[in-house]
Image: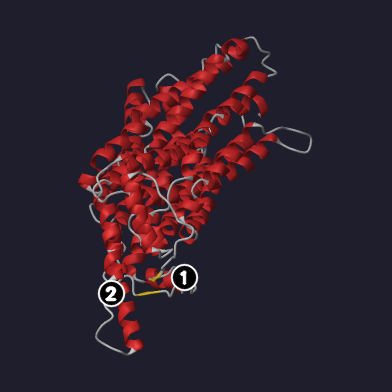
Amino acid sequence: MSAEVEKISTSGSSDPHMEKGRNVTSLTYALDEKRRVALAEVDNAKFGWFHIKVSLVAGVGFFTDAYDIFAINIAATMLGYVYGKGGSLNSNQSLGVKVATPVGNVFGQFFFGWLADLVGRKRMYGVELMIIIVATFGQAVAGQAHAVNVLGVIIAWRFIMGVGIGGDYPLSAVISSEFASTMSRGRLMTAVFANQGWGQLAGCIVAYIIVVSYKSTLLHENSDDMACIDQMWRILIGLGCVPGVIALYFRLTIPETPRFTMDVERNVKQAAQDVDNFLTTGSYYVDPDAVVQRVQAPKATWSDFRQYYSKWENFKLLLGCAYSWFALDIAFYGLGLNSSIILTAIGFGSPSADLTGTLKVYTNLKNVCIGNIILSVAGYIPGYWASFFVIDKWGRKPLQLMGFIMLTILFIIMGFGYDALNKTPAARKAFVFLYCLAYFFENFGPNVTTFVIPGEAFPTRYRSTSHGIAAASGKVGAVVSQVGFAQLSNIGGTNKFLGHILEILAFFMLTGCFSTLLIKETKQQTLEELSNETQEGFIDGVVPIGDAVA
């Protein structure tokens, strides 16, 4: 194609202005064609080592995210023994420690989503991981003094960590989407996101190993001074740095996506070269001395953003993605309010009243760890991989709709039958089964698709921003669920309102069915086809070399 550009005809007219116009038109056409050829190479590429590398580099981030988010559920119990009155944190302390991260997520998803479209995916990728690493280490070394409360310090660090974790959502989604081939894009993005399940499980296993390792020390310790538990929660949280540190180098050295280079930086020649390099050698090279020929193409501006989303077909897609994620996260985090009941039902709840002292503390911590391992394996992880196997066959929209319908039915049964399902041991086993089934259909359905679809359905110049908006909407739902439902759960007595909360969750799942109707199917379509923009003549001119990009 570069040879074609060089052979532009200059015959047929002696008028230099006409000649220049004809040359520009021919060059524009050649570059537009070069763009389509390069994109076709990416879209039709066979699954190879570079795709595996992208999956692993992006996936380790989500592994770290999930470890850091869910490890606090166990660490909060440990914090209660060390810093709480009566061996536990009060409701406000527990809520603050747990809700700080999703609040930070909201800011990170908006901010990093916008920055990735502004300055590039590569420039921002790794920055969010550095924030996570620093904030995780900060929590692990948080201290107490006369003027400083250790829980306040932890909450501040968890908010900062949440900003970094929030940034990981749009960045990893968009990078994996833009490098993937059309045939396997859904599976690649699902494989990245499924690392959340492994991260949660790893957090539970690490916590169990730490608790068992400290058994002898804990049993011989004074119950009024839980120094070893102070070490335990710090080790548990601090180990969350390790996978992030391992992945950091690879994130900082990942190439810029060719779609961003072409459509936002508007350097078609460099993007075409990148495609050839990473598909053959898995590497990339940017010649700092190369002459850059930029093209004229749609540019991300506030007026262009408003114009794009002023079209109902575009806005309804963003609305459908954002509300579906909001509704899903309300249920995802609301379901966790019932975990204490589930753990008791499967024999890993609060220890027997006959136990006292540090033996009771040890038994409680071990039960919490084992119980959460069982819940992760029983419902959390299988759903991700069920989605992995069918997402490129069934499609995203049917999978999401099926998940919301099943969750509506399950929450109706669990909510309206709550009292009956908790009367007898046999009934509680049925409740445990329904609970695990609900977790399964959250992941075998909307928890995966709400991540995948926003990373595919929008044009390159707004893809990361749009994903950030949708993801932030989800975390607003998480905050609403954790703050609102946690206050409602004890109306009428301890856990007396949980049945009604499940009924409320059923309503939100029903609304998720309707919001799913607003989205479009993205299966087996290129990202350019999904952008709802004409690709023929996408490049409408060239910028004279040396001039500023218009």
Please state the horizontal and vertical placement of residue 517, each as a whole percent of the image: 28, 57
Please state the horizontal and vertical placement of residue 75, each as a whole percent of the image: 56, 29
In the figure, residue 387 lies in which quadrant?
top left
Nearer to us in this view, 147 or 15: 15
Q: Give left or right: position of 450 versus 472.
A: left
The residue located at (26%, 83%) in the rendering is 11
SS state under label 1: loop
Residue type, numbered disc 1: Thr
The residue located at (37%, 40%) in the rendering is 53
Please state the horizontal and vertical placement of residue 137, each as a whole percent of the image: 61, 35
Q: Is residue 428 visible?
A: yes
Residue type, numbered disc 2: Ile
Please state the horizontal and vertical placement of residue 546, each as a whole percent of the image: 48, 72
The residue located at (35%, 60%) in the rendering is 458
* Residue at the far right in the pictured view: 146
* Residue at the far left in the pictured view: 393
Nearer to us in this view, 324 or 537: 537
Q: Nearer the viewer, mark 2 or mark 1?
A: 2
Residue 211 sits above or below residue 127 on the image: above
Residue 36 sits above or below residue 325 on the image: below
* Color scheme of the displayed model: secondary structure
Determine whether label 2 and label 1 are within 8 Å by CB.
no
Residue that badge 2 annotates: 8
Residue 444 sits above or below residue 451 on the image: above
Residue 301's tag is 1
Q: Report the number of numbered marks.
A: 2
SS state under label 2: loop
Q: Is residue 334 visible?
A: no
Mark closest to the chain's N terminus, 2 or 1: 2
In the figure, residue 237 lies in which quadrant?
top right
The residue located at (43%, 63%) in the rendering is 265
